[in-house]
Image (cartoon, rainbow, N blue to C red):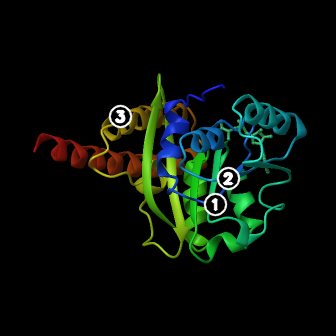
């Protein structure tokens, strides 16, 4: 039987799945995440969904290679449209853009009610996703980082409810625990990214660029403060 190995990105998502969860993995592609969770007896069964039939066929192949037929259900659907609220208490949506993730949740307002855990791993537009979550009845209960080579990934644990408004820097970089050992390197990485954007804006003389530059400088200052706070924690 094939044994699934997860990369740090998906392993970090997997570690947040509650024991015994009734899980839907949206945009499952190869279904590595539900297959790993089933092989490690973390969950009893799973629903794997995808928008396209090719990825869903790959998911079926994984289930068959791992001897997990009968424990995984496959649904061809857009986001959560093929899932009834009472079927699941935990939803994973990984490896998609933040705006796609927000659109999937917007199409399933029941995800902001009841006892649910959403584990979201956006590949882009993280700031827009955090903003959308805070304006639409979700709270980010925890944020983790994963690192593969030079690339950092944000993993958001989200539950229904309200959260205090995130600051400019928290919207950009998230609010990981100060104990997160990756946070310092991640904040340095984001500061360099901001410097590159600022260098581009400095070449332009338009009013819009100047205003954007001013906002970026404020953001840079807040991120620097965050990094210092993290460093103080690690120096203790
Ligand atoms: C890059 S793969 C990510 C696979 C896996 N979740 C992971 O993180 O490794 C993205 C998958 O999401 C699927 N997808 C994109 N938009 C979707 C939507 N609205 N609903 C369901 N699946 C979607 C794509 O077909 C693709 O298989």
* Helix, strand or loop for disc 2: loop
Q: Position of residue 169 (x, y in %)?
A: 41, 53
Q: Nearer the viewer, mark 1 or mark 3?
A: 1
Q: Which residue is mark 2?
A: 45
* Circle number at residue 123: none
Which element is circle 3 on?
Answer: helix
Residue corresponding to mark 1: 22
How far apart are labels 2 and 1 at the CA level?
7 Å
What is the spatial separation of the Cα atoms under label 1 and label 3, in whole angstroms? 38 Å
Task: Quickly name the residue at label 3.
Answer: 188
**Residue 207 visible within the image:** no
Label located before the other in sequence (2 or 3): 2
Q: Nearer the viewer, residue 197 or 73?
A: 73
- Label 2 and label 3: CA atoms lie apart by 40 Å
The answer to whether residue 160 is left or right of residue 27 is left
Q: Is residue 139 visible?
A: yes
Nearest to the observer: residue 216 or residue 35: 35
Toward the top, the furthest residue is 149
Pointers 2 and 1 in contact (CB under 8 A)? yes
Quarter of image, res 67: top right
Whole-percent x and y of residue 102? 68, 58
Write the residue at 86% across / 53% down: 77
Q: Residue at x 75, y 68 (%)?
A: 108
The residue closer to the viewer here, 88 or 102, is 88
Quadrant of the image containing the C terminus: top left
Residue 17: percent from left, percent from top: 52, 53
């Amino acid at each position: 039987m094939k044994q699934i190995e997860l990369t740090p990105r998906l392993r970090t998502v997997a570690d947040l799945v509650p024991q015994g969860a009734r899980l839907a993995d949206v945009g499952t592609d190869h279904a590595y995440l539900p297959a790993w969770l089933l092989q490690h007896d973390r969950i009893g069964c799973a629903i794997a969904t995808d928008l396209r039939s090719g990825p869903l066929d790959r998911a079926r192949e994984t289930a068959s290679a791992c001897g997990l037929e009968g424990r995984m259900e496959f649904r061809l659907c857009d986001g959560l449209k093929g899932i009834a609220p009472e079927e699941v208490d935990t939803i994973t949506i990984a490896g998609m853009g933040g705006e796609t993730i927000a659109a999937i949740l917007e199409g399933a307002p029941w995800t902001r009610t009841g006892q649910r855990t959403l584990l979201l791993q956006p590949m882009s537009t993280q700031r827009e996703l955090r903003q959308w979550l805070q304006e639409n009845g979700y709270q980010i209960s925890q944020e983790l980082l994963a690192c593969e080579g030079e690339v950092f990934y944000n993993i958001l644990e989200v539950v229904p409810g309200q959260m205090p408004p995130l600051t400019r820097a928290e919207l950009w970089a998230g609010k990981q625990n100060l104990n997160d050992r990756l946070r310092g390197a991640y904040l340095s990485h984001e500061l360099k990214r901001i410097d590159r954007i600022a260098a581009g804006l400095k070449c332009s003389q338009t009013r819009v660029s100047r205003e954007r530059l001013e906002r970026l400088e404020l953001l840079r200052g807040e991120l620097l403060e965050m990094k210092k706070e993290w460093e103080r924690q690690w120096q203790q």
